[in-house]
Image (cartoon, rainbow, N blue to C red):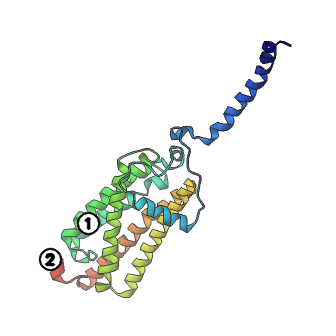
Amino acid sequence: MPPAARRSSKSPARSPARRAKSPARSPAKSPKSGGKKLPPPEPLTWATGLRASFDRATNVLSTRSAFPPHSRAVLSRPLSAYGLSPLAYTLVGVFTVIQNIYCPGALPFWPPRYAVPEAAFVVLQSSFSFMSDVVHIGHTSLWHPVDRNCALLLTAAQVLKFFVLMPRAAPLWACAAVWCGIVVGLACKVRATAASRAADYAGFARWHTLWHWCLPLTIGGYTAVAWQTYARSSVGLLPASVLGR
C-alpha cells in the first residue's frame, strides 16, 4: 500500500480517539468559574471551620466571594430562611433604639451616647450582610469586604461589652447565659464555614442562618430582661457617672 494511502487509512482511526478524549478533560474545569479549576471540597470538621474562619478573618479586604458561582442556586434566594436571616440585626437594632427612648438606664453596659450609634451600625450591618451573603454571593463585589469588616467590629464590640464590662455589673447567672449564647453563635459560625469548605451549601445555609439569629436573640433577650428589671427596681445597670447623667 502506498504511504499516502496508509496515512489516509490511519487518520480516521486517530481522530475519533482524539475527539473522545476532549470531553474527559472538560470536567476538570468549571465553566461557571471562568475556566479555573475549583479547589476540592475539604472534610466537614471543626478544624476545617476554624482554619477557614481564620483565613477569612485575615483576608477581610478581598472583594472575592468565598463561594463559587454555582452555589448561587442554593444561597441566592432572598425569600428563604437563609435570605431573610440578616433581618435579625435590624430587629435587635430597632429594639435598642426603642429601649434608648423609653428606658436608657437599662441599656447593657454602654452609655446611651454609644448605644444609639451602635444600634444604627447594627441595622446597617443587616443590609451589608444581605448584599454580601445573598445578592452578590458567588460574585466579586465590594460588599464582601464591607460585610466582613463591619461584622468583625461589631463582634469585637459585643465581646468587650459582655465579656469585659458585664462581669462588673451583672449577676453571674446573667453572665453565664449571655456567654453561652455568644459561644453557641460563634460555634454555628465556625460550623457554617466548615460546611462551605466542604461544598455543603445547604448545610452552610442552615448554620449561617443560626449564626445570624443566635447573637441577636441572645443580646436582645438579655436587654429585654434588663429593661423589665430596671423598670421594676428603678436601679440602673451602670452607675450614673458612667451613664453620663
Q: Secondary structure at mark 2?
A: loop
Task: State left or right for residue 113 relative to residue 211.
Answer: left
Q: Quadrant of residue 17?
A: top right
Residue 64 percent coordinates (x, y) = 42, 48
Q: Is residue 224 visible?
A: no
| Amino acid beneath label 2 | Gly
Residue 9 percent coordinates (x, y) = 81, 17
Task: State left or right for residue 76 relative to residue 124.
Answer: right
| Amino acid beneath label 1 | Ile
Task: State left or right for residue 85 relative to residue 204.
Answer: left
Question: Which callout, 2 or 1, points to the residue nearer the camera?
Answer: 2
N-terminal label among 2 and 1: 1
Instruction: Tell me: residue 33, above or below residue 197.
Output: above
Instruction: Tell me: residue 199, above or below residue 32.
Output: below
Residue 189 percent coordinates (x, y) = 47, 64
Circle on res. 98 = 1
Instruction: Tell me: residue 238, above or below residue 83.
Output: below
User: Residue at left 35%, top 63%?
Assistant: 152
User: Residue at left 14%, top 77%?
Assistant: 244
Name the residue that disc number 2 marks. Answer: 244
State the residue in front, 104 or 239: 239
Number of numbered discs visible in the structure rendering: 2
Residue that lies at the very extreme toward the front in this rendered image? 3
Residue 60 percent coordinates (x, y) = 37, 57
